[in-house]
Protein backbone atom coordinates (compact mmCIF):
# COMPACT_ATOMS: atom_id res chain seq x y z
CA UNK A 1 0.00 0.00 0.00
CA UNK A 2 1.36 3.41 -0.97
CA UNK A 3 1.59 6.32 1.38
CA UNK A 4 -0.02 9.56 0.30
CA UNK A 5 2.33 12.52 -0.10
CA UNK A 6 -0.04 14.58 2.04
CA UNK A 7 -0.04 12.06 4.86
CA UNK A 8 2.20 13.21 7.75
CA UNK A 9 5.21 11.05 8.32
CA UNK A 10 5.64 9.25 11.65
CA UNK A 11 7.93 11.15 14.00
CA UNK A 12 11.46 9.85 14.14
CA UNK A 13 12.51 8.37 17.46
CA UNK A 14 14.10 10.77 19.91
CA UNK A 15 17.85 10.16 20.32
CA UNK A 16 18.68 8.63 23.68
CA UNK A 17 21.86 8.44 25.72
CA UNK A 18 20.85 4.99 26.92
CA UNK A 19 21.37 1.61 25.28
CA UNK A 20 18.12 -0.15 24.26
CA UNK A 21 19.15 -3.24 26.23
CA UNK A 22 19.79 -1.30 29.45
CA UNK A 23 17.53 -2.09 32.45
CA UNK A 24 14.13 -0.42 32.42
CA UNK A 25 13.29 2.22 35.08
CA UNK A 26 10.78 -0.20 36.66
CA UNK A 27 13.44 -2.90 37.02
CA UNK A 28 15.88 -0.31 38.36
CA UNK A 29 13.33 0.74 41.00
CA UNK A 30 12.74 -2.84 42.10
CA UNK A 31 16.46 -3.49 42.36
CA UNK A 32 17.25 -0.46 44.49
CA UNK A 33 14.25 -1.09 46.76
CA UNK A 34 15.41 -4.65 47.33
CA UNK A 35 18.95 -3.38 48.01
CA UNK A 36 17.51 -0.84 50.46
CA UNK A 37 15.61 -3.49 52.42
CA UNK A 38 18.60 -5.85 52.57
CA UNK A 39 20.94 -3.02 53.51
CA UNK A 40 18.64 -1.79 56.28
CA UNK A 41 18.33 -5.28 57.76
CA UNK A 42 22.08 -5.82 57.67
CA UNK A 43 22.75 -2.40 59.21
CA UNK A 44 20.20 -3.01 61.98
CA UNK A 45 21.73 -6.40 62.78
CA UNK A 46 25.26 -4.98 62.90
CA UNK A 47 24.35 -1.91 64.97
CA UNK A 48 22.42 -4.08 67.40
CA UNK A 49 25.59 -6.00 68.20
CA UNK A 50 28.13 -3.16 67.71
CA UNK A 51 26.49 0.16 68.69
CA UNK A 52 28.55 3.16 67.51
CA UNK A 53 27.77 6.84 66.96
CA UNK A 54 29.98 6.81 63.86
CA UNK A 55 28.00 3.97 62.29
CA UNK A 56 24.73 5.59 63.26
CA UNK A 57 25.81 8.76 61.48
CA UNK A 58 26.82 6.77 58.41
CA UNK A 59 23.46 5.02 58.45
CA UNK A 60 21.70 8.40 58.69
CA UNK A 61 23.80 9.71 55.79
CA UNK A 62 22.86 6.65 53.75
CA UNK A 63 19.17 7.22 54.43
CA UNK A 64 19.56 10.87 53.48
CA UNK A 65 21.30 9.83 50.28
CA UNK A 66 18.38 7.58 49.34
CA UNK A 67 15.98 10.45 49.99
CA UNK A 68 18.03 12.73 47.75
CA UNK A 69 18.13 10.03 45.11
CA UNK A 70 14.33 10.14 45.01
CA UNK A 71 14.23 13.98 45.02
CA UNK A 72 17.68 15.34 44.02
CA UNK A 73 16.47 18.97 44.09
CA UNK A 74 16.45 18.70 47.89
CA UNK A 75 20.22 18.42 47.64
CA UNK A 76 20.48 22.06 46.56
CA UNK A 77 18.55 23.14 49.63
CA UNK A 78 20.71 20.86 51.79
CA UNK A 79 23.88 22.56 50.52
CA UNK A 80 22.33 25.98 51.12
CA UNK A 81 21.24 25.12 54.66
CA UNK A 82 24.56 23.46 55.50
CA UNK A 83 26.59 26.42 54.21
CA UNK A 84 24.59 28.78 56.43
CA UNK A 85 23.90 26.70 59.52
CA UNK A 86 25.96 23.45 59.74
CA UNK A 87 28.87 24.35 62.04
CA UNK A 88 30.44 20.88 62.27
CA UNK A 89 34.09 20.63 61.19
CA UNK A 90 35.53 17.34 59.90
CA UNK A 91 39.20 16.60 60.60
CA UNK A 92 41.38 15.13 57.82
CA UNK A 93 44.64 14.40 59.62
CA UNK A 94 46.23 17.51 58.08
CA UNK A 95 45.94 21.24 58.76
CA UNK A 96 42.90 21.25 56.44
CA UNK A 97 39.40 20.81 57.88
CA UNK A 98 36.34 19.95 55.81
CA UNK A 99 32.69 20.76 56.46
CA UNK A 100 29.26 19.38 55.66
CA UNK A 101 28.42 21.87 52.90
CA UNK A 102 31.61 21.08 51.00
CA UNK A 103 31.11 17.31 51.14
CA UNK A 104 27.48 17.60 50.09
CA UNK A 105 28.42 19.11 46.72
CA UNK A 106 29.98 16.00 45.10
CA UNK A 107 27.42 13.78 46.85
CA UNK A 108 24.44 15.72 45.46
CA UNK A 109 26.03 15.91 42.01
CA UNK A 110 26.57 12.14 41.96
CA UNK A 111 23.00 11.49 43.11
CA UNK A 112 21.66 13.84 40.44
CA UNK A 113 23.57 11.89 37.78
CA UNK A 114 22.37 8.59 39.21
CA UNK A 115 18.77 9.81 39.24
CA UNK A 116 19.05 10.90 35.62
CA UNK A 117 20.40 7.49 34.62
CA UNK A 118 17.62 5.78 36.58
CA UNK A 119 14.90 7.79 34.83
CA UNK A 120 16.70 7.92 31.47
CA UNK A 121 16.34 11.70 31.49
CA UNK A 122 19.84 13.07 31.81
CA UNK A 123 19.64 16.51 30.18
CA UNK A 124 22.77 18.62 30.42
CA UNK A 125 22.24 22.39 30.37
CA UNK A 126 25.27 23.34 28.35
CA UNK A 127 26.74 26.84 28.12
CA UNK A 128 29.90 28.59 26.92
CA UNK A 129 31.14 28.47 30.52
CA UNK A 130 31.52 24.67 30.47
CA UNK A 131 34.66 24.52 28.34
CA UNK A 132 36.88 26.95 30.33
CA UNK A 133 35.54 25.54 33.60
CA UNK A 134 36.52 22.00 32.62
CA UNK A 135 39.87 23.13 31.20
CA UNK A 136 40.64 25.00 34.41
CA UNK A 137 40.20 21.77 36.37
CA UNK A 138 42.47 19.95 33.92
CA UNK A 139 45.06 22.73 34.23
CA UNK A 140 44.96 22.35 38.02
CA UNK A 141 45.68 18.62 37.76
CA UNK A 142 48.47 19.26 35.26
CA UNK A 143 50.02 21.81 37.63
CA UNK A 144 49.75 19.34 40.52
CA UNK A 145 51.58 16.71 38.48
CA UNK A 146 54.27 19.04 37.13
CA UNK A 147 54.77 20.65 40.52
CA UNK A 148 55.62 17.29 42.09
CA UNK A 149 57.81 16.18 39.18
CA UNK A 150 59.81 19.42 39.31
CA UNK A 151 59.75 19.81 43.11
CA UNK A 152 62.96 21.35 44.45
CA UNK A 153 64.50 18.76 46.82
CA UNK A 154 65.78 21.46 49.17
CA UNK A 155 62.20 22.57 49.89
CA UNK A 156 60.79 20.40 52.71
CA UNK A 157 57.27 18.99 52.56
CA UNK A 158 55.39 16.46 54.67
CA UNK A 159 54.67 12.93 53.50
CA UNK A 160 50.95 13.65 53.30
CA UNK A 161 51.32 17.01 51.54
CA UNK A 162 49.75 15.50 48.44
CA UNK A 163 46.49 15.38 50.42
CA UNK A 164 46.71 19.14 50.93
CA UNK A 165 47.34 19.62 47.22
CA UNK A 166 44.34 17.48 46.34
CA UNK A 167 42.25 19.44 48.84
CA UNK A 168 43.24 22.68 47.09
CA UNK A 169 42.32 21.24 43.71
CA UNK A 170 39.14 19.94 45.34
CA UNK A 171 38.11 23.53 46.04
CA UNK A 172 38.37 24.21 42.31
CA UNK A 173 36.34 21.08 41.54
CA UNK A 174 33.65 21.75 44.16
CA UNK A 175 33.18 25.29 42.83
CA UNK A 176 32.67 23.84 39.33
CA UNK A 177 30.21 21.21 40.59
CA UNK A 178 28.25 23.86 42.52
CA UNK A 179 27.95 25.92 39.32
CA UNK A 180 26.81 22.92 37.28
CA UNK A 181 24.37 21.74 39.94
CA UNK A 182 22.24 24.88 39.85
CA UNK A 183 22.60 25.20 36.07
CA UNK A 184 21.11 21.72 35.60
CA UNK A 185 18.73 21.32 38.53
CA UNK A 186 16.86 24.63 38.25
CA UNK A 187 15.97 24.61 34.55
CA UNK A 188 12.36 24.87 35.69
CA UNK A 189 11.92 28.65 36.30
CA UNK A 190 9.81 28.05 39.40
CA UNK A 191 12.63 26.02 40.97
CA UNK A 192 15.19 28.80 40.51
CA UNK A 193 12.80 31.40 41.92
CA UNK A 194 11.95 29.26 44.95
CA UNK A 195 15.62 28.46 45.58
CA UNK A 196 16.56 32.15 45.36
CA UNK A 197 13.85 33.27 47.78
CA UNK A 198 14.84 30.49 50.16
CA UNK A 199 18.34 31.98 50.30
CA UNK A 200 17.00 35.51 50.69
CA UNK A 201 14.62 34.57 53.50
CA UNK A 202 17.03 32.25 55.32
CA UNK A 203 20.30 34.08 54.74
CA UNK A 204 18.78 37.55 54.95
CA UNK A 205 16.69 36.70 57.99
CA UNK A 206 19.65 35.25 59.87
CA UNK A 207 21.80 38.25 58.89
CA UNK A 208 19.18 40.58 60.38
CA UNK A 209 18.97 38.50 63.57
CA UNK A 210 22.76 38.51 63.98
CA UNK A 211 22.75 42.32 64.13
CA UNK A 212 19.78 42.70 66.49
CA UNK A 213 20.70 43.52 70.11
CA UNK A 214 19.86 40.73 72.52
CA UNK A 215 19.36 38.00 69.94
CA UNK A 216 22.50 38.48 67.85
CA UNK A 217 24.61 36.28 70.10
CA UNK A 218 22.04 33.50 70.01
CA UNK A 219 21.78 33.66 66.21
CA UNK A 220 25.57 33.45 65.89
CA UNK A 221 25.57 30.13 67.76
CA UNK A 222 23.73 28.31 65.00
CA UNK A 223 25.19 30.05 61.95
CA UNK A 224 28.45 29.32 60.14
CA UNK A 225 31.50 31.40 59.37
CA UNK A 226 29.89 32.26 56.01
CA UNK A 227 28.19 35.22 57.72
CA UNK A 228 31.51 36.96 58.35
CA UNK A 229 32.85 36.40 54.84
CA UNK A 230 32.64 38.94 52.01
CA UNK A 231 31.13 36.65 49.31
CA UNK A 232 28.01 36.09 51.41
CA UNK A 233 27.37 39.83 51.77
CA UNK A 234 28.14 40.53 48.11
CA UNK A 235 25.65 37.85 47.05
CA UNK A 236 22.99 38.95 49.54
CA UNK A 237 23.25 42.59 48.44
CA UNK A 238 23.15 41.64 44.76
CA UNK A 239 20.11 39.37 44.91
CA UNK A 240 18.14 41.65 47.25
CA UNK A 241 19.03 44.78 45.28
CA UNK A 242 18.31 43.09 41.96
CA UNK A 243 14.79 42.13 43.02
CA UNK A 244 14.04 45.56 44.45
CA UNK A 245 15.24 47.45 41.38
CA UNK A 246 14.05 45.14 38.58
CA UNK A 247 11.04 43.22 39.88
CA UNK A 248 7.95 45.46 40.02
CA UNK A 249 5.71 42.47 40.84
CA UNK A 250 7.01 42.24 44.42
CA UNK A 251 4.39 42.50 47.13
CA UNK A 252 4.66 45.09 49.89
CA UNK A 253 5.77 42.50 52.45
CA UNK A 254 8.68 41.25 50.35
CA UNK A 255 9.73 44.79 49.50
CA UNK A 256 9.89 45.72 53.17
CA UNK A 257 11.86 42.58 53.97
CA UNK A 258 14.39 43.24 51.20
CA UNK A 259 14.83 46.86 52.34
CA UNK A 260 15.55 45.51 55.83
CA UNK A 261 18.10 43.10 54.33
CA UNK A 262 19.86 45.92 52.44
CA UNK A 263 19.88 48.08 55.57
CA UNK A 264 21.54 45.18 57.41
CA UNK A 265 24.13 44.84 54.65
CA UNK A 266 24.96 48.56 54.81
CA UNK A 267 25.22 48.61 58.60
CA UNK A 268 27.43 45.54 58.66
CA UNK A 269 29.77 46.53 55.80
CA UNK A 270 30.03 50.31 56.22
CA UNK A 271 29.75 50.65 60.01
CA UNK A 272 30.36 47.48 62.02
CA UNK A 273 33.05 46.01 59.74
CA UNK A 274 34.35 49.19 58.17
CA UNK A 275 37.97 48.07 58.66
CA UNK A 276 37.32 45.04 56.40
CA UNK A 277 37.63 46.67 52.99
CA UNK A 278 36.55 43.52 51.14
CA UNK A 279 33.00 43.94 52.46
CA UNK A 280 32.27 47.57 51.67
CA UNK A 281 34.29 47.73 48.45
CA UNK A 282 32.57 44.62 47.08
CA UNK A 283 29.11 45.86 48.09
CA UNK A 284 29.85 49.30 46.63
CA UNK A 285 30.78 47.59 43.36
CA UNK A 286 27.49 45.65 43.43
CA UNK A 287 25.49 48.81 44.11
CA UNK A 288 27.28 50.73 41.37
CA UNK A 289 26.59 48.05 38.77
CA UNK A 290 22.92 47.73 39.75
CA UNK A 291 22.37 51.49 39.56
CA UNK A 292 24.19 51.64 36.22
CA UNK A 293 22.05 48.82 34.81
CA UNK A 294 18.74 50.13 36.13
CA UNK A 295 18.93 53.87 35.51
CA UNK A 296 20.12 54.16 31.92
CA UNK A 297 19.21 57.83 31.60
CA UNK A 298 21.37 58.73 34.61
CA UNK A 299 24.57 57.20 33.25
CA UNK A 300 25.82 60.48 31.78
CA UNK A 301 25.25 62.28 35.08
CA UNK A 302 27.00 59.48 37.01
CA UNK A 303 30.07 59.58 34.74
CA UNK A 304 30.23 63.38 34.97
CA UNK A 305 30.02 63.32 38.75
CA UNK A 306 32.76 60.69 39.08
CA UNK A 307 35.06 62.58 36.70
CA UNK A 308 34.53 65.81 38.66
CA UNK A 309 35.32 64.07 41.96
CA UNK A 310 38.53 62.70 40.44
CA UNK A 311 39.63 66.01 38.90
CA UNK A 312 38.99 67.93 42.11
CA UNK A 313 41.02 65.40 44.08
CA UNK A 314 38.13 64.44 46.35
CA UNK A 315 37.34 60.83 45.37
CA UNK A 316 40.54 58.87 45.98
CA UNK A 317 41.71 60.70 49.15
CA UNK A 318 38.24 60.29 50.63
CA UNK A 319 38.20 56.57 49.89
CA UNK A 320 41.72 56.22 51.27
CA UNK A 321 40.77 57.87 54.56
CA UNK A 322 37.53 55.89 54.79
CA UNK A 323 39.57 52.69 54.41
CA UNK A 324 41.77 53.64 57.37
CA UNK A 325 44.38 55.92 55.83
CA UNK A 326 48.09 55.60 56.62
CA UNK A 327 47.49 53.54 59.76
CA UNK A 328 45.68 50.81 57.84
CA UNK A 329 48.26 50.91 55.05
CA UNK A 330 51.12 50.39 57.50
CA UNK A 331 49.23 47.68 59.35
CA UNK A 332 47.93 45.76 56.34
CA UNK A 333 48.44 47.29 52.89
CA UNK A 334 52.23 47.45 52.73
CA UNK A 335 52.69 44.02 54.28
CA UNK A 336 50.33 42.50 51.71
CA UNK A 337 52.50 43.84 48.89
CA UNK A 338 55.52 42.19 50.55
CA UNK A 339 53.66 38.88 50.73
CA UNK A 340 52.54 39.13 47.10
CA UNK A 341 56.11 39.88 46.03
CA UNK A 342 57.37 36.75 47.80
CA UNK A 343 54.67 34.53 46.24
CA UNK A 344 55.33 35.85 42.73
CA UNK A 345 59.08 35.46 43.26
CA UNK A 346 58.90 31.74 44.10
CA UNK A 347 56.30 31.06 41.39
CA UNK A 348 58.72 32.31 38.73
CA UNK A 349 60.57 29.02 39.20
CA UNK A 350 57.89 27.58 36.90
CA UNK A 351 55.65 30.39 35.63
CA UNK A 352 53.95 28.30 32.93
CA UNK A 353 52.22 25.66 35.07
CA UNK A 354 52.95 27.14 38.49
CA UNK A 355 54.15 25.37 41.62
CA UNK A 356 51.02 23.23 41.94
CA UNK A 357 47.90 23.65 44.09
CA UNK A 358 48.78 24.91 47.61
CA UNK A 359 52.52 24.44 46.91
CA UNK A 360 53.64 28.02 47.34
CA UNK A 361 53.41 27.75 51.14
CA UNK A 362 56.49 25.45 51.49
CA UNK A 363 58.45 27.43 48.89
CA UNK A 364 57.82 30.80 50.55
CA UNK A 365 58.85 29.43 53.97
CA UNK A 366 62.43 28.45 53.17
CA UNK A 367 63.79 32.01 53.48
CA UNK A 368 63.14 34.62 56.22
CA UNK A 369 60.85 37.50 55.32
CA UNK A 370 61.43 41.11 56.42
CA UNK A 371 58.92 43.96 56.45
CA UNK A 372 59.88 47.24 58.12
CA UNK A 373 60.76 46.30 61.73
CA UNK A 374 59.29 42.80 61.54
CA UNK A 375 61.43 39.77 60.67
CA UNK A 376 59.87 36.31 60.20
CA UNK A 377 62.37 33.46 60.46
CA UNK A 378 59.91 30.84 59.25
CA UNK A 379 57.17 32.78 57.47
CA UNK A 380 53.76 31.22 56.81
CA UNK A 381 52.86 33.17 53.69
CA UNK A 382 49.42 33.85 52.23
CA UNK A 383 49.21 36.29 49.35
CA UNK A 384 45.73 37.52 50.39
CA UNK A 385 44.98 37.96 46.70
CA UNK A 386 42.98 35.38 44.75
CA UNK A 387 44.54 36.28 41.41
CA UNK A 388 48.07 35.86 42.76
CA UNK A 389 47.05 32.59 44.42
CA UNK A 390 45.66 31.15 41.19
CA UNK A 391 48.83 32.15 39.34
CA UNK A 392 50.93 30.38 42.00
CA UNK A 393 48.69 27.29 41.99
CA UNK A 394 48.35 26.85 38.22
CA UNK A 395 50.79 29.21 36.49
CA UNK A 396 50.11 31.40 33.50
CA UNK A 397 48.28 28.51 31.82
CA UNK A 398 45.69 28.08 34.56
CA UNK A 399 45.50 31.79 35.29
CA UNK A 400 44.72 32.56 31.66
CA UNK A 401 42.02 29.89 31.56
CA UNK A 402 40.55 31.26 34.80
CA UNK A 403 40.30 34.76 33.31
CA UNK A 404 38.61 33.20 30.27
CA UNK A 405 36.21 31.39 32.62
CA UNK A 406 35.27 34.52 34.55
CA UNK A 407 34.95 36.43 31.29
CA UNK A 408 32.46 33.86 29.98
CA UNK A 409 30.45 34.05 33.22
CA UNK A 410 30.38 37.84 32.93
CA UNK A 411 29.33 37.57 29.30
CA UNK A 412 26.56 35.16 30.24
CA UNK A 413 25.38 37.49 32.99
CA UNK A 414 25.33 40.45 30.61
CA UNK A 415 23.36 38.49 28.00
CA UNK A 416 20.78 37.41 30.56
CA UNK A 417 20.48 40.95 31.94
CA UNK A 418 19.72 42.32 28.48
CA UNK A 419 17.19 39.55 27.79
CA UNK A 420 15.37 40.04 31.10
CA UNK A 421 14.70 43.55 32.33
CA UNK A 422 11.83 42.99 34.77
CA UNK A 423 10.12 40.36 36.86
CA UNK A 424 11.97 37.77 38.92
CA UNK A 425 14.19 36.83 35.96
CA UNK A 426 15.19 40.47 35.47
CA UNK A 427 16.03 40.87 39.14
CA UNK A 428 18.00 37.64 39.17
CA UNK A 429 19.96 38.25 35.96
CA UNK A 430 20.90 41.83 36.79
CA UNK A 431 21.60 40.96 40.42
CA UNK A 432 23.92 38.10 39.53
CA UNK A 433 25.73 40.19 36.93
CA UNK A 434 26.38 42.66 39.76
CA UNK A 435 27.43 39.76 42.04
CA UNK A 436 29.89 38.62 39.35
CA UNK A 437 31.40 42.13 39.22
CA UNK A 438 31.58 42.33 43.01
CA UNK A 439 33.26 38.92 43.15
CA UNK A 440 35.91 40.00 40.65
CA UNK A 441 36.63 43.03 42.85
CA UNK A 442 36.89 41.27 46.22
CA UNK A 443 39.27 38.69 44.76
CA UNK A 444 41.90 41.44 44.81
CA UNK A 445 41.57 41.72 48.60
CA UNK A 446 41.71 38.04 49.59
CA UNK A 447 41.25 34.50 48.31
CA UNK A 448 37.48 34.81 48.50
CA UNK A 449 36.18 32.88 45.49
CA UNK A 450 38.69 30.00 45.37
CA UNK A 451 40.15 30.03 48.89
CA UNK A 452 43.71 28.99 49.70
CA UNK A 453 43.48 25.96 51.99
CA UNK A 454 45.97 27.50 54.44
CA UNK A 455 44.14 30.84 54.68
CA UNK A 456 40.36 31.22 54.21
CA UNK A 457 40.20 27.51 53.41
CA UNK A 458 37.19 25.23 53.49
CA UNK A 459 35.47 27.07 56.39
CA UNK A 460 35.33 30.28 54.33
CA UNK A 461 34.54 28.30 51.19
CA UNK A 462 31.05 27.86 52.63
CA UNK A 463 30.42 31.49 51.59
CA UNK A 464 32.06 31.04 48.18
CA UNK A 465 29.89 27.98 47.49
CA UNK A 466 26.81 30.18 47.63
CA UNK A 467 28.13 32.52 44.95
CA UNK A 468 29.10 29.66 42.64
CA UNK A 469 25.67 28.08 43.10
CA UNK A 470 23.82 31.23 42.07
CA UNK A 471 26.22 32.04 39.24
CA UNK A 472 25.17 28.66 37.83
CA UNK A 473 21.60 29.93 37.93
CA UNK A 474 22.49 32.32 35.10
CA UNK A 475 22.51 29.28 32.79
CA UNK A 476 19.07 28.23 33.95
CA UNK A 477 17.26 31.57 34.03
CA UNK A 478 14.67 31.84 31.21
CA UNK A 479 15.49 33.25 27.79
CA UNK A 480 12.47 35.38 26.83
CA UNK A 481 12.28 39.17 26.89
CA UNK A 482 10.22 40.37 29.85
CA UNK A 483 10.49 44.12 29.73
CA UNK A 484 12.32 47.20 28.58
CA UNK A 485 15.05 48.80 30.58
CA UNK A 486 14.25 52.37 31.59
Image (cartoon, rainbow, N blue to C red):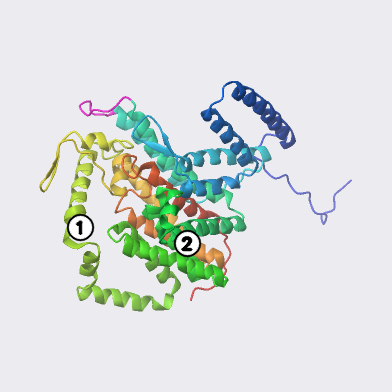
Marks 1 and 2, how far apart at CA:
31 Å
Instruction: Tell me the quarter of the image containing the N terminus.
Output: top right
Residue farthest top in this picture: 49
> How crowded is the residue under tag 1: few (<14 C-alpha within 10 Å), some, or many (20+)?
some
Crowd rating for badge 2 (residues with CA inside 10 Å; few <14, some 14–19, many 20+):
many
Above-or-below relation of 34 to 313 = above
Residue 156 among those drawn in magenta: yes
User: Is residue 116 rendered to the left or right of residue 266?
Assistant: right
Mark 2 or mark 1, which is nearer the start of the sequence? 2
**Does dot 2 land on a helix, a strand or a loop?**
helix
Image height of 393 relative to 297, above or below = above
Region in magenta: 150-159
Viewer-nearest of discs 1 and 2: 1
Residue 53 appears in the figure: yes
Question: Vertical placement of 35 versus 462: above or below?
Answer: above
Location of mark 1 (residue): 328
List x then y, in percent, for residue 295: 43, 75
Classified by dominant secondary structure, the portion drawn in magenta counts as loop
Q: Residue at x 39, y 42 (%)?
A: 458
Magenta stretch encompasses residue 118:
no
Q: Which residue is mark 2?
A: 239
Q: Element type at marker 1?
A: helix
Q: Is residue 455 left or right of residue 236?
A: left
Which residue is the extreme one toward the front?
A: 214
Amino acid sequence: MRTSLNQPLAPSPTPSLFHPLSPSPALFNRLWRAALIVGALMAAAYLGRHPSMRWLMLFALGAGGLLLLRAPILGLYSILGAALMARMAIATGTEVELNVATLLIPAVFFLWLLDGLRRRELHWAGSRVDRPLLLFLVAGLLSLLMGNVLWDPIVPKSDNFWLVQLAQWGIFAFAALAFWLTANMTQNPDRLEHFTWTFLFLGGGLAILRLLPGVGGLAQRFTTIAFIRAPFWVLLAALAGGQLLFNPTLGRGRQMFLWAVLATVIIYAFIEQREAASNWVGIAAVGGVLIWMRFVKLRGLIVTLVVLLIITGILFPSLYEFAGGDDEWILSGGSRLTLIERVVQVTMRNPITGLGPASYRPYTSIEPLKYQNAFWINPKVNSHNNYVDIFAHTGLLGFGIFLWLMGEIGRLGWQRSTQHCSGFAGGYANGMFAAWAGSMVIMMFADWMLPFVYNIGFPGFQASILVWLFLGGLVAVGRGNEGVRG
